[in-house]
Amino acid sequence: MQNIVGLLALIVMAALLAWSAFRTWRAKNHIVKWGGTGFLALLSVPVLSAGALMSLGMVKQHSRSAPIPDIAVAATPELVARGKDIADGLCGACHSHTGTLTGGYDLAVELQFPIGSFVAANLTPAGPLKHWSDGEIFRAIRNGIDAEGRWLTMMSYIRAGRLTDDDIKAVIAYIRSLPAAGDPTPDPPDHMNMLGLAMLGAGMLPSGKPIITGHVSGPPKGPTYQFGEYILSYQDCRECHGEKLTGGVPGQLAPLGPDLNLVKDWTLAGFVAAMRTGIDPNGYQISEQMPWRSVGKMDDDELAAIYQYLTHMPTP
C-alpha cells in the first residue's frame, strides 16, 4: 500500500511539474520562458524515471509463477531425521534466530542495500504453513512462491531450490513434526520499498533464481567431493563468496565473503572446528554474517564432503 501511495505521489508530482512547465512556457519574458521551462523539464526527468522504474518493478514482482506439484509426504522417522539434518544446516541460518524455525528475523539487515523488509517465516504450526499443502511447501522451497502465488523474494534469491526432490520432502516431513512455537508471521512477510522496486525495475536486483519444474536428484551421502559439490549447490556460499567461491564482488546484494581457496591451507580437523566454534585455524573470529553456527550443525560426513570439495577446487 505504501508503495502504491508513493507511486501515486510521483505521478502527481510529475503532473504538477508538467503543468508548471506549460504555464512557464507561456511567459512573455524569454529568460523565464526558456530557463524556467528547461529547469522544470530537467526536474521532471528523475521523477518520471523513478515512477516508470517503480511501475516496472511492480510488474516484475508479480510475474513469477510455477506449478504446485501434486505430492503427499509420508513422514517416516528416517525422513524426519534427514529433514532435521538439512533444516539445521540450511534453514536455521534464517529461520531459527528466535527459536527452532520460529522465524521473525528480518533478513534485510544482511543486505548491502536498504531495499525493504524480508521477515523469515515461522515454519512451525504457529506460522502459515499449517494451512499449506505439501505441494505448496515444496513449491516455496523449490521456486520461492508462497501458497497465495506471491513471490517470496529471499527464498527465490537463495539456492534451496537445488535440494533434491527427496531432500525437500524430508524437510517438509520435519517441518510437519515440529510443535507450534513463536509468533505468527507478518502477512505478507516480504515488503520491497520504493528503492527496491526502482532497482528491480532497472534490473539492478535479480528476479530470482530460474524456475525449476523437473526432477532433481543428487549423489549418495558420504564424505566425498561429489556430495560436497551437492551441498554447496544448495547452500548459499556463492551468494557471498562469489560464483566460483573465489571471493565476493563489490556491488553484490549479499555481504562480501573471502576467497575460499584459503581452506586449502587448513586441515580437515581445523575446518570442522572452525565451522563449529567460529574460530578459524589461525585463531581469528569468523564474522557473524557467515552462518557458521548452522553450517556447524552438519554431521562429520557432510563437513568432510564440503572440505573435500573446497580443497580440490581448481586454482584460479
Image (spheres, rainbow, N blue to C red):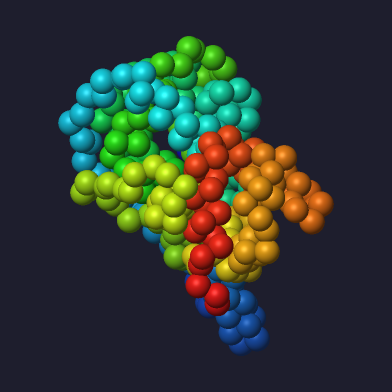
Q: Nearer the viewer, residue 212 or 195?
A: 212
Residue drawn where x is 50% and y is 35% of the image: 91
Quadrant occupied by the C terminus: bottom right
Q: Work out which residue is located at the far left of the displayed protein and give it.
A: 70
Residue drawn where x is 35% and y is 25% of the image: 79
Q: Work out which residue is located at the far bottom of the displayed protein and give it.
A: 30
22 relative to 106, above or below: below
Say how many tags the image has: 0
Q: Nearer the viewer, residue 11 or 123?
A: 123
x, y (%) of residue 96?
A: 58, 29
x, y (%) of residue 47?
A: 54, 64
124 relative to 59, above or below: above
Q: Work out which residue is located at the far right of the displayed protein and give it.
A: 283
Q: Is residue 296 visible?
A: yes
Residue drawn where x is 47% and y is 47% of the image: 223
74 relative to 221, above or below: above
Image-based side of 98 in relation to 128, left or right: right
Q: Nearer the viewer, residue 106 or 295?
A: 295
Residue drawn where x is 56% and y is 18% of the image: 183
x, y (%) of residue 11?
A: 47, 56
x, y (%) of residue 208?
A: 40, 53
Q: Nearer the viewer, residue 17 or 304?
A: 304
Q: Is residue 159 visible?
A: no
